[in-house]
Image (cartoon, rainbow, N blue to C red):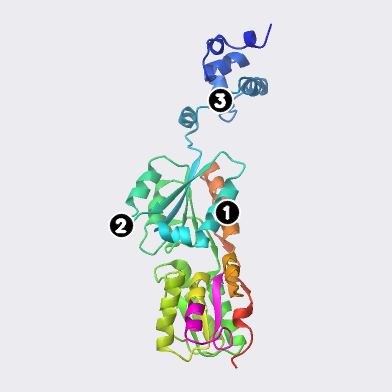
Amino acid sequence: MNENTRRPALLQAGRPSPTLEDLATAAGVSRSTASRAINGGLKVSPAAQAAVDAAVVALGYTPNRAARSLVTKRTASVALVIPEPDARVMMDPFFAAVITGVNEALRGTDMQLVLLMSRAGDDSARTIRYLRGGHVDGAIVVSHHKGDDWAETLGSTGLPTIFIGRPWDTSFGVPFVDLDNFEGGRLAARHLAGIGRTRLGTVAGPVDMPAAADRLDGWLQGLRDAGLQPGPVVHGDFTTPGGADAARHLFTEAPELDGVFAASDLMALGVIELVRSGGRRVPEDVAVVGFDNHALLAAHGLGLTTVTQPMVDMAVTAGQLLIRAIEDPELPLEPVIYPAELVVRGSTAGPTT
């Protein structure tokens, strides 16, 4: 008997792809047993599972994802929700690190990543409808704002959801992965005070973002710890142009500043550009501390003192937590908080001269 005569008759007739019925026939089991075997092996004997596995290899069988999802109630997709304009997402390395980390967490699974970003004039309703529509098995939300209702809405849907960054309102019980942003701001203040800088200001992040609020609170606490009066605060938008514009207002209000903490590395770059354009030196005249530790600043030849935010690691953790939540929705998940660490480089070297 040759190889072709051992295959089901339907395949010999020229059918392009083997069906579930073909698989069941080749394995010598019922269609329902074959279906259970390829969808997790529930209530399938070891012998039947082995026969189906062998038939899958012999026939080159590929499960129909649409049919499989009807059985498993799974889509094999997860969403990464970024409620920010696409221009900012594409320009900020923070988001590239998040996507890299989540993809790494999904490596070795059958899950695909669906990226959901805001469009001009959008509110969250369109994305919420999509998430509620059964298109994904879970969601990771990053870069959220005070006015967003993501935690409340997704917390009530039953869709497994993980936040990267603390939600503004944690009472809805959505698990999250975050950095100790308060301690990061405090470390920046302590460091600048420790190198003898006493006239300090900050370019804070957006007032409606939890991470920015926590960094500012930590900064102010660090100044109090050092016995210094709080200096001027100007809010930026986590971009380089926004940082430069905020720094312009900062130095207009307090031209005597000898140290600045910027709540992101991109804003720190804008601060440094503004300082240098005014004929002052970094760090001799103005010491600058950033936040993120983005590798891209090395391309500018800038040794920036900064607080490390291990975004790839944090995103990997968020992805792993989401997988666990999808596999066991009743499993309680606690927040994961990464410690803050200050990396000292040339932008703060030495006291004012």
* Rendered location of residue 130, percent (x, y): 38, 44
* Rendered location of residue 255, percent (x, y): 45, 90
Number of dots carrying numbers:
3
Residue 285 lies within the magenta run: yes
Among the two numbered marks 2 and 3 on one chain, the one whose residue lies closer to the N terminus = 3
Q: Residue furthest top?
A: 1
* Rendered location of residue 281, percent (x, y): 55, 86
- Alpha carbons under labels 1 and 3: distance apart: 33 Å
Among the two numbered marks 1 and 3 on one chain, the one whose residue lies closer to the N terminus = 3
* Rendered location of residue 2, percent (x, y): 68, 8
> Relative to 229, is 59 on the left or the right?
right
Is residue 143 visible in the rendered image? The answer is no
- Alpha carbons under labels 2 and 3: distance apart: 46 Å
Q: Residue tagged by mark 3?
A: 36
Name the disc covering residue 101, or none: 1
Name the disc covering residue 121, or none: 2
Q: Amino acid at mark 3?
A: Arg
Looking at the image, residue 63 lies above or below residue 263 = above
Residue ID at (64%, 87%): 350
Residue ID at (59%, 68%): 299
Looking at the image, residue 93 lies above or below residue 280 = above
The span shown in magenta is 271-292
At numbered mark 1, what does the secondary structure look like: helix, strand or loop? Answer: helix
Residue ID at (49%, 81%): 220
Relative depth, front residue between 288 and 151: 288
For the residue carrying disc 1, how many other residues have a C-alpha within 10 Å: few (<14), some (14-19), or many (20+)? many
Is residue 302 visible in the rendered image? The answer is yes
Looking at the image, residue 352 lies above or below residue 85 = below
For the residue carrying disc 3, how many other residues have a C-alpha within 10 Å: few (<14), some (14-19), or many (20+)? some
